[in-house]
Amino acid sequence: MFDLRTSPTDERKQSTLQTLNSLGFAAYALDFRGFGETARDETGYTTPQRCVDDVKVAIDWINARHG
């Protein structure tokens, strides 16, 4: 989440990823294929299973990077 607000009157825009990073966490935001700026694959469809597959690849990459 971006623009995390702690109360209805909180006008600060707090980045969750930046806050977690400042606390020492390795924080990532996934851009699934077909969403955001990531192109769809050759099928033109995004399915729940493809999203699961993408998460598995991301977890493997993060684990290889951070152990």
Image: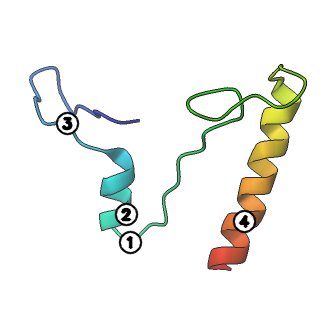
Residue 12 rendering spot, x and y as whole percentages: 13, 36
Quadrant of the image occupied by residue 58: bottom right
Residue 56 rendering spot, x and y as whole percentages: 80, 51
Q: How far apart are marks 2 and 3 (CA)?
A: 16 Å
Q: Residue at x 49, y 66 (%)?
A: 26
> Dots 2 and 1: beta carbons under 8 Å?
yes
Image depth: mark 1 or mark 4 in front? 4
Q: Residue 13 carries which label?
A: 3
N-terminal-most mark, 2 or 3: 3
Looking at the picture, which amino acid does disc 2 mark?
A: Asn
Looking at the picture, which amino acid does disc 4 mark?
A: Trp
Secondary structure, mark 3, is: loop
Q: Residue at x 33, y 67 (%)?
A: 23
Classify residue 8 as left or right of residue 62: left
Secondary structure, mark 1, is: loop
Q: Which mark is residue 24?
A: 1
> Dots 1 and 4: beta carbons under 8 Å?
no
N-terminal-most mark, 1 or 3: 3
* Disc 4 target residue: 61
Looking at the picture, which amino acid does disc 1 mark?
A: Gly
